[in-house]
Image (cartoon, rainbow, N blue to C red):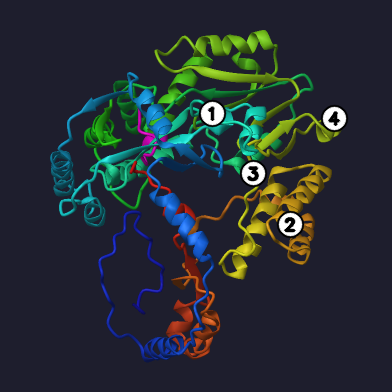
Amino acid sequence: MFENKDKPVIHPFRTNTGFKPGPTCNALENYIHKTKLELSSIPLKERQENLSISERNALASLKNNPDIVIKKADKSNTVVVMDKCKYIKEGLRQLQSKHYIEVERPNLMNIQNVIQEKLTEMHSNGYLDKETFRFLNDSKNIPRCGQLYLLPKIHKIKGTVLNALNDGLCSLKDLPPGRPIISQCATPTYKIGAYCDHFLLPIVKKQLTYIKDTTDFIVKLESLRPPPEVLFVTYDITSMYTNMEFDELITAVKEAYQNADKPVADIPYPKVSDFVFLIKTILENNYFEFNGKYYKQTIGCAMGSTVSPEVSDIRMYQITHMIMNQFEHANKVLFHGRYRDDGFMIFNGTRDEILKFFEIGNSCHRYLKFTYEISGETANFLDTTVYKGRLFQTEGKLDIKSYIKPTNNFQYLQRNSAHCQSVFKGFIKGECIRHLRNTNDKQILEIILDDFRMHLLNRGYSETEINPIITETKLLARSKALEKQRNKRAIPTPLVMVTKYNPCVKGLKRRLLKYWKDLKSDSDCNQIFDSEPMVAYSKHKNIGDLIIRARLQ
């Protein structure tokens, strides 16, 4: 341990082997022993309940109610309580489409055995290292079938109707459309999906239209100085994941993987034929259960599979590239970026000219369709609004601000919730920095932060804890908020004590550090342990975990 001072690279598919190291140097062993005694001597206060008996009874009633289904809304943190019969009706409506067929109970063990045979062959031929093979080897585990669930698209409901629903003034005859998600946990293809995604993600990142996240989008946009008359164009590719056929997806992935640069990597690259076999197996064996019956997806990628975003992205990039090659006004597209199935363009032409782009797009594929919005003034994309405001008029720089969705009900973490104090402070600071990053006009930022303050007050926070953080945010340089994160490998791995938060247990950090100086007095330990240990709290079960289920009960 002490001979190799270089920090090892963490394997991307590391598994827990259960290895327990033997005794090392005296300084480290003394620190471990004394700290264990310190932690075990912490006095425990009397347990505090954070829910009343009536609230616990209400939760149990909700959880066991056979007539309702509770889910989070699509693209929102809103919790939606639905009539179970209407939920099943919406699910069956979607399952009657060309994308799915009903099947007998699938032989999942047979699928798993086929996958394991291929993985064993790859390992024997040197295309799969020992650690990755151990991660992927599921021969001892019994596979489970996927579970279909729906996220209600309440953002599709008109604003006036949504307000009436929130006020209890009306009800819906039918549910809004649901986004179909197939939970893949413990399915035969779950782990090989993560493995394939490891190799496809670098390919997607090199696409010319690739947008990583909001920060990436803002940085790219703020480097532009478009002429005054440009149009903002946003588009959505309807059901992108589920509207591309297996053959075109497999062909696109094969071509992209075959032609991709393959720099020296942590793990061996699989052969093209083996990689295609795994992708084909994932796509063609997407079995799932809904309402006690079994189905198989026959077109597209499963929403919920780890590898689906990259597989769909690769094929969609080919399609948009083809459309752009046929588009006679492509030279007038000053910017084109895409985040999954959402696209953003800045077009220096007329509305009629850009409509031809979508005419080509809506006729070039059997299933895929584009919906779009065109504006000369403003556009919403990701969690930003891009517009021609004060900065555009004075500096030629596009104005950007945080976009607040109409369905946002501002149900922030309540101040009296059972969390450690740093969580509340960290949440406020994180949101403030997000608004700072998303908003390049200081006057607009003032308005947004004031609005945020009011919503926090409504959730039980005090001015004394809100105002210092907001003031600190206003003094920060926005360029810092837009900086790219450092490479994870460049960040030293911290020593972390992971536990669940308990308000009855006090002084964990102080006790961890009590004998830290003694440890650092040893020359070897001083070199290896370059930062103090920290306490991190893992997630407790919350109300959502108790009442929301993927599987239809």
Query: Where is residue 52 drawn, in percent x and y?
Result: 53, 65
Residue depth check, mark 1 versus mark 2: number of the one nearer the observer: 1
Magenta: main secondary structure: loop
Residue 409 tag number: 3
Whether residue 470 sits left or right of residue 511 in the image: it is right
Q: CA distance from mark 1 to mark 2?
A: 32 Å
Residue 76 tag number: none
Label 1 amino acid? Leu
Residue depth check, mark 4 versus mark 2: number of the one nearer the observer: 2
Quadrant showing the C terminus:
top left
Whether residue 360 sits left or right of residue 264 in the image: it is right
Q: CA distance from mark 4 to mark 1?
A: 45 Å
Label 2 amino acid? Leu
Q: Residues within 10 Å of mark 4 (few under 14, many from 20)?
A: few
Label 3 amino acid? Asn
Chain-order first, disc 1 or disc 2: 1
Pointer 3 with pointer 2, Cβ within 8 A: no
Chain-order first, disc 4 or disc 1: 1
The residue that disc 1 covers is: 172
Q: CA distance from mark 4 to mark 2?
A: 35 Å
The residue that disc 2 covers is: 457
